Image: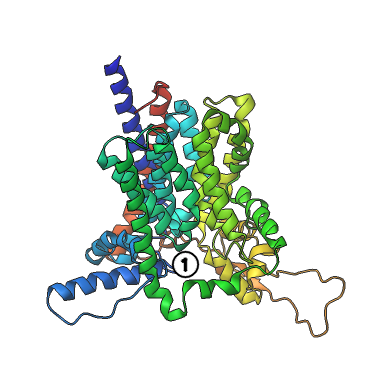
Amino acid sequence: MQGETLKTVTSVRKTAWLLFLSLTFSYLALSPASVGGRGYINEELDSGARMLEVFNTWVKGRPIPPMLWSRHGPVPVIFDLPFIKIGKLIVSPDFILSFQPVLLTAGLVTLLFLWLRKITSPGMSLLLALTAAFGTMLWPYAYIGLETKQSFFVVLAGYLALANGKIRGWPKLMLFGVASGLALTLKSTGIVMWPAFAYLLYVQFRNDWRSRRAELVVSALVIVGLLAVGAWGRTFFWRPLGGGSANMLPWMIDSPFQIFINTIGQIGSPTKGALIFAPVLLVSLIALPRAFREYRDITIFAVLVTLTYLGFMSLFRYPSDEVWGPRYTHVAVAPLVLCIGAAWKRFEWRKHSPIVLLGLIGLMISFLGAFYYYGTIGSAMEQAGQNTMEWHNGDPDWNAIVFDERIFRVYWQGGTEPVMWTPVHIWVWSPPAGARPWTAINLRDYAAPQSFLLAWWGRPKPGVLMNAFRFFLLCCAVGPILLIWTVTRTARERPTKIV
């Protein structure tokens, strides 16, 4: 019996590695091969490059250049350093760093799959994992990269604390502490999730905290220590600007009613709602009561992660920005998908066909977010003279999904002739005096995909560009083949829990 269990464990782990590789190659097939223009990523790239330069000059005894700091401090930049260093040797740091969010997203989904395999059948585990991978905002953010570090460590910490019972041994306990601390530290907003991680500590030590007092104290000190280091590191960026809090105040709400409005908007807004950019989360909301009865700790953790971020972002006038979808709910996608598996262990067509339907809708939506750079719509709005945060967050004409679908049709039809479009708005009921006409824009100017492979298709590719082109072309073949292999392998596995 023990040999059979060990064989099953080995089989599932091999499938997990296969899933990780298949997702990595599949994501890379549409990779932009760049992190340029993606929020604060350039800040972190410059900060990491300067860290390496400072270290190099210090070792060689040369004058040390002034340090460059990024808004989330040096802790997240540490994870960029290997990619930046390799990038100095191969192609460029910008090119190699673009692989990081792909690897983190593939790793996050793989952890989700392993966690699901402990509570659901193999088929249900893979269905939910692939739905999360390609039918939610996780796919576009494998190229945007702004939330992937934090979301990965949130899932890792939850997996370590809740998937295998009590954490035994100092190495695993330290890993849990570090993962929890990083989840709270990698973004300055991460501290709002402290109730979720306090709950993880409670679950681990609720029954035997007296006999494990040393382990509890060390775990808490590791988490608090990382929080302190992160807070200290961020001061170098924000102190010259007057402090982080001072820079947040102009964005805060001025009416308590906005808390309720913003909370609901983050979930169901037609332009920025999580249910729009990750439709399968609708099933998650329905599944929560059943999941709570079956796996209370998992459900509480997922709900705490979600509600703490929703509550914090509801305090801002604009809980979402110009980036694809409600990016601050990215961290909640995997935990909420996990709750579907916690509610229903096996897939039944009659009951669970909505998962497939919403997954397919999410696939189409996420494809558009992966196909186009999120800043494309901002450029179009600027040309049309309508680039306000209000239009980004609430104007149906500038709905990112609808706009990307509109320019995708232009791209698909081909040609070079201009395709003019005017974002006309309806005055109620007559235009104000002196109102200027709405500006028409050429959709052809925005229809180019962000994919490196498609951008260089049919164009001369000298030197290293040709090698990069061949690599991404190879990913187009390898990714789907490995995905098919993963599906067939999972179909043959026995529904036995793993360790």
Q: Left of 385 or right of it: where is 43?
A: left
Q: Left of 205 or right of it: where is 313?
A: right
Q: Amino acid at mark 1?
A: Gly
Helix, strand or loop at mark 1: loop
Q: Quadrant of residue 255?
A: bottom right
In the rendered image, the residue lying farthest to the front is: 210
97 versus 25 height, above or below: below
Badge 1 crowding class, 10 Å Cα cut-off, few under 14, some 14 to 19, many 20 or more, is: some
The residue to which callout 1 is attached is 39
Residue 284 picture location, percent across and down: 59, 39
288 versus 313 height, above or below: above
**Along the line of sight, the residue nearer the viewer: 150 or 430:** 150
Q: Which residue is located at x 41 percent, y 66 percent? A: 72
297 versus 398 height, above or below: above
Residue 228 picture location, percent across and down: 36, 62
Residue 199 picture location, percent across and down: 47, 43
Residue 336 picture location, percent across and down: 54, 42
